Image (cartoon, helix red, strand yellow):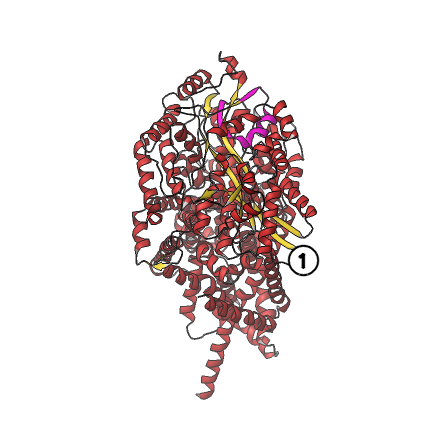
Amino acid sequence: MRTVVKGLFSVLMSMALITGCSSGNAPATGSQAGAGAGSEAAAGSGAGKASGEKTELTFFYPVAVGGPLTKIVDGMAEEFNKANPDIAVKPVYTGSYQDTTTKIQAAVQGKTPPDVAVMLSTELYTMLDMDAILPLDDFIAKDGGSEYVNDFYPGFMANSQVDGKTYSIPFQRSTIVLYYNKEAFKEVGLDPEKPPQNWDELVEYATKLKKDGRWGVEIPTSGFPYWMFQSFALQNGKNLMTEDGKKVFFDTPENVEALQLWVDLAKKHQVMPEGVIEWATVPSDFLEGKTAMMYHTTGNLTNVKNNAKFDFGVAFLPAKKTFGSPTGGGNFYMFKGIDEKKQEAAWKFIRFMTEPERAAQWSIDTGYVATRKSAYETESMKEYVKTFPVAAVARDQLAYGHAELSTHNNGKVTKALNDSLQAVITGQAEPAAALKKAQEEADKILAPFNK
Amino acid sequence: MGLEHRAKWRINIYAWLLLLPSLIFLVLFTFYPVLQTVILSFYQADLGSPEPFFNGGDNYRIMLEDDVFWKVLTNNLWFALGTVPTSIALGLAMALFANKALRGKGFVRTAYFYPTVVPMIAVANIWLFIYTPEYGALSHVMEWFGHGGMNWLGDRTNVMFAMIFMVIWKEAGYFMIFYLAGLQNISKELYESASMDGAKPWTVFRRVTFPLLMPTTMFVLIIAFTNSFKLVDHLVIMTKGGPDNASNLLLYYIYETAFSFWDQGMASALTVVMVVILLLVAAIQFFGLDKKIHYN
Amino acid sequence: MFRKITGVAMYGLAALWLFPLVWAFWTAFRPRELAISWTLSPDFTLDNVIKVWNAAPFAQYYLNTFLIVTGVLAVQIVTATLAAYAFAKLRFWGRDALFILFLVQLMVPADILIFPNYNVLRDLSLLDTKLGIMMPYFASAFGVFLLRQTFKTIPHELEEAARMEGCSWWQILWRVYVPLARPTYIAFGLVSVSYHWNNFMWPLIVTNSVENRPLTVGLAIFAQSFETGAQWAEVSAATVMVIFPLLLAFLLFQRQFINSFIHSGVK
């Protein structure tokens, strides 16, 4: 098929020249062909052809927090280039996590993968199924060793490893925490230093905090509700999938109970808005005092810190059987099909980007959790935690952090769960039935991987 | 005879050469892709199968059992039903109004038309804010009526209406332009003789204007209908098809299937369905309703 | 009475239609803290616009969109003129069948063939190039129809006369048909430019790099990048920046645009 297309295309190009000459519009058509050749060449170099001595690396990265953060990443890459004159990293900002995933998959399918990329840690199985990524164990063994790997929090590494191999290195990572408005707590007679410890208290406090124009709590459910839901599943005893990403546990009684709690918060207790709650507006609601508590990513810490006009607290998510939260966010991956020189350079870059100092600075700038224990030993981080103690809450909760939902055919499986969750939230289905449906669908999707 | 024959040949070659540039692109990006899609739709080509293999009608069978497929299909029909007649009727009303020399004619025409030149992505950004609970314009307005907390995009029923209204806003002005053009072709004398007979405005519209605008209506109908299958940009910004696929449309589902799930066989089968629907509608248009009116 | 009511209603509609634009501008030029409040105060700021301009390479996106739009239009005009002339003025074998094939593109536009066309582009190694974004639109059935309709109304005698003077066929096309169809070209240009300026799905799929990303994709990426919560002021500012040039062009030339549209033979 490829040759057919190529053939057609060459006919077309020669045609363009002929008709171009005779139609009296030669300049227009001519320049068109020229532009084509030019951009093709540009694409070639964009894919990272080594030119001369320098090893060029294309680096795709998402920024979920917007605006100036792209500058921080670009700046870090520049710093790296300066320190390593024989390597030139070209950072390409590829939008949100979802956009980046799509871009990378498309690039892999188009046989022009980037050399390194930050993408969701949960894409591991998809990338493996596409045969797109390299295991990093050899590099780790040569440079860094287990000392390096073990320095990362296990909750973050959980999504990086399968079958005893390590495929990605944590970079821009988060978990879910509870943000609460201390002044609202005081107002209704709750102790502002005692956030809700368990589900019962969550309901109780939220009910107390609810008043006209203010909700008790908001749990965002747009876009990727599975992530929020996963924290409830973890608190109630069990993660949503097996470690090999081949089985899911959606319809357990514990999960039904968890989902029922969501429904009750909105319908029965009426302390949370009904319908799907938009991820992006929840922080605004919190900052505007329209909700007294919110579940949100630690990535929001800096935003809330800078914009809250009231005293706020950050706490572990309320527990059921145990505390628990999934981790989230992006890891470094290295892609197949690049030569050894590039692999070496890419590993150097990954090491550079994940150095404790840099991880600490990244955490301070963004609010994301620093990925390594040693990052919290650095002077700047110690200073930061001292002046802003809540920054340590997310880190401490990592003791209860688990792998984010990640399976083979991840997109389809999470969509099955997301759809069911939203069906329940919008009042279209009962928790048990909806989760059963999600389970059946996921089983069907995963069947080929269980052969 | 020989000479005439040769002349005929010459014209034939000449005509085909003129058509060749268009034809090559048409083949490359319309016919060949459709053919390739049909073939690929009989293959299993997804993340679970490294090498695509022939699987008969499996994709179609799975598709027919897929609730989401039926959901997006019915959504798309409702979406078409909601947007097409309303925006066409509104476009006609706008044209009739803007055509009469009144005060502020240019202003009114501009107000109706400008959404056409605003990219759908920009439209989606603006309307996303308008529809946002608590802070959006609509929420503020609804507050005056005591319904401030309405969740427009987070509710299964509301979300469709919200989308439909936005698309009508975007498209009506575009159709107005076609009607304005159509109105120029109706001779003034017809109206003059009608007013001599003392016909009421409504009668004139029913007996003269509307029937004579029929070709325009048919043309606009095609555009409006294809647009209702083509327009999915706003979903990327506003809802991603949610909640629970309540706003999901066929093309967006194809996009998800192809580029998020990499289920290429299924994406192809879905594309085939899309092509068949559009061709069926075209066939009805050209061979049924539209025999005499157009393209001649 | 009836007339008055409809008059008021239609002016009301115009106001309603303008509202989203006003709202976008309003939000874009107000301090970001005020974006979520519903108050009328005379605050005005350019901060949002400046911030957005610095946060993402919108200048590059502008250039990309401009190149794509002009490239598409230039090629479309050539291909469509040639094809329209053949359909309008020549009798040849297979004309009707071919014409129906062209009709198909009107009903099955490249926009819905995103997945198969992505594969074609991959086979041509044209992913993430401007040419790749443009190519599926180089042949425009819509343009062919419009021009064919116009060419048909041009009397044959004009062509005969030109031929008598010894004009070759392309001179005839260039000197007789093209000038007479000017309004049609403008109308088609308007449709094509606004269409491709607005196009999103296809460039989203085929572009990765800043060098090729058009405005719409850049805007979407920018608007989606706020994990920490919606930034309405910034997003509105970006939106306004993106729509402003086209809107301005339209406002300045709207009379010409709309008139040529009306007289273009679009029926």
Q: Nearer the viewer, residue C206 or C26?
A: C206
Q: Quadrant where the C terminus of chain B lies?
A: bottom left
Q: Quadrant where the N terminus of chain B lies?
A: bottom left
Above-or-below relation of A116 to A215: below
Magenta segment: A292-313
Residue B112 shows in the view: no
Place residue A77 in its image quadrant.
top right
Q: From the viewer's perspective, is A160 left or right of C246?
A: left
* Residue C28, horizontal then vertical, whole percent: 61, 35
What chain does badge 1 belong to? A
Which residue type carries mark 1?
Answer: Glu
Q: Residue at x 52, y 64 (%)?
A: C80
Place residue A245 in its image quadrant.
top left
Q: Residue at x 37, y 41 (%)?
A: A416
Q: Which residue is mark 1?
A: A53
Q: Nearer the viewer, residue A42 or A315?
A: A315
Q: Is residue A306 magenta?
A: yes
Above-or-below relation of B4 to C157: below
* Residue A209, horizontal then vertical, whole percent: 46, 17
The residue most toward the top is: A189
* Residue A424, horizontal then vertical, whole percent: 35, 32
Local secondary structure at mark 1: loop
Place residue A287 in its image quadrant.
top right
Q: Nearer the viewer, residue A116 or B195?
A: A116
